[in-house]
Image (cartoon, rainbow, N blue to C red):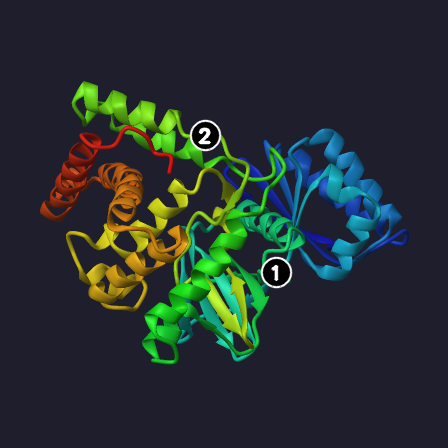
Amino acid sequence: MEYIKYKMDGDHLIIDLMGHIDSANAAAVEKEINEAMDREAPAKLTLDATDLKYISSAGLRIILRLRKEMKDLKIINVQPEVYEIFDMTGFTEMVDIQKAYRVISVDGCEVIGQGANGKVYRIDPDTIVKVYLNPDSLPEIHRERELARAAFVLGIPTAIPYDVVRVGEGYGSVFELLNATSFAKLIINDEKTPDEVAAMSIDLLKLIHSTKIKPGTMPDMKAVALDWADFLKDYLPEEKYQKLHDLVAAVPDDMHMMHGDYHIKNVMLQNGEVLLIDMDTLCHGYPVFELASMYNAYVGFSDTNHHQVEEFIGIPYDTAVHFWKESLRLYLGDPDEERFKEVEEKAQLIGYTRIMRRRIRRNGFDTEEGRTEIENAKAHILDILDRVDTLEF
């Protein structure tokens, strides 16, 4: 009787486990596995548990013996009932065991959110799914779930993912959001004015920025921004690069939370309650870094092509510029013009540093559009550096 099927992929042996593995057939299953191992002499071994319905302690002992021989053993496509057995017996801590994930499609679904690492789709009236751009995104998904839980425990209103699914060749996180509407949609559908949405947005942002976190809980945005600045060393005059580096390095260390990609497609309104989504960018740091990200979302990324913000967020460029200025005004508490301009330029300096680095890394010098964007960002950086002596405010 055939208890397994297998195939070779280069030096990689993939064995399909099937049905039940218990004391009645464990010896025969192990014999067939060993014969395949002896015949193929693989460098890597993966057990595919798609069709495995049950495994007893006798079957678990087979896996223990295989792991002694193949340290990089993986078990994939494990059904929930079988995964529970592996989890209860501690095997998930010893072996790389991957669940089988429900498969869904987002064809024809509305895009309601978008961030640096994925898009958020509404798949039915009650449910949304964030689909990650990286097809090998399971570590990112688990990290985002940890960040979302950490924020939720600290009192930040956020949707918590409850399931992981396959979407095409990649993965997604599923959230329950009943009757939720993005802040962008509220403006697009004329349900609220841009100023009303800006007020709600800044109320939440101030809550986020007033929340202190423990060291090591979230990434440090200052370190990220310093990498952006250092990347430009070969693209700026030496004294300008050095000043940019020194300004970022001098920003005070700050353990207050930031979202890291805060814009109106990443905030939802659900039954009068404001909720954050797209939590994989959560970090900590001085607020100038958050303001720089917001400036880029509404203005900076569309500075040389005003259509980009409408494609990305869904509102016209003029509305986006107004929204940015109203948001900054509310954040600063209705400042005078001089104070407003001072803080805006500090955010712009970090924002254009990121834009210039991003465009260069994406082969921007190879196209006219890219060169225009790089030169525009560089001109802003050099101009602002002549006036700014600190990024604090």
Residue in the picture at 39% in, 41% down: 289
Q: Is residue 89 above or below residue 19?
A: above
Left or right: where 141 falls relative to 57: left
> Where, quadrant-wise, is the C terminus in this rendering?
top left
User: Closer to the N terminus: mark 2 or mark 1?
Assistant: 1
Check residue 252 in the rendering and tell me which mark sits there, or answer none.
2
Q: Is residue 245 visible?
A: yes
Residue in the picture at 74% in, 54% down: 83
Front-lying residue, 328 or 186? 328
Q: Amino acid at mark 2?
A: Pro
Q: Is residue 133 above or below residue 230?
A: below
Disc 1 is placed on an element classified as: loop
Separation of marks 2 and 1 at Cα, in angstroms? 31 Å
Mark 2 crowdedness (10 Å alpha carbons): few <14, some 14-19, many ≥20: few
Left or right: where 181 falls relative to 8: left
Q: Name the residue carrying label 1.
A: 160
Q: Amino acid at mark 1?
A: Ile
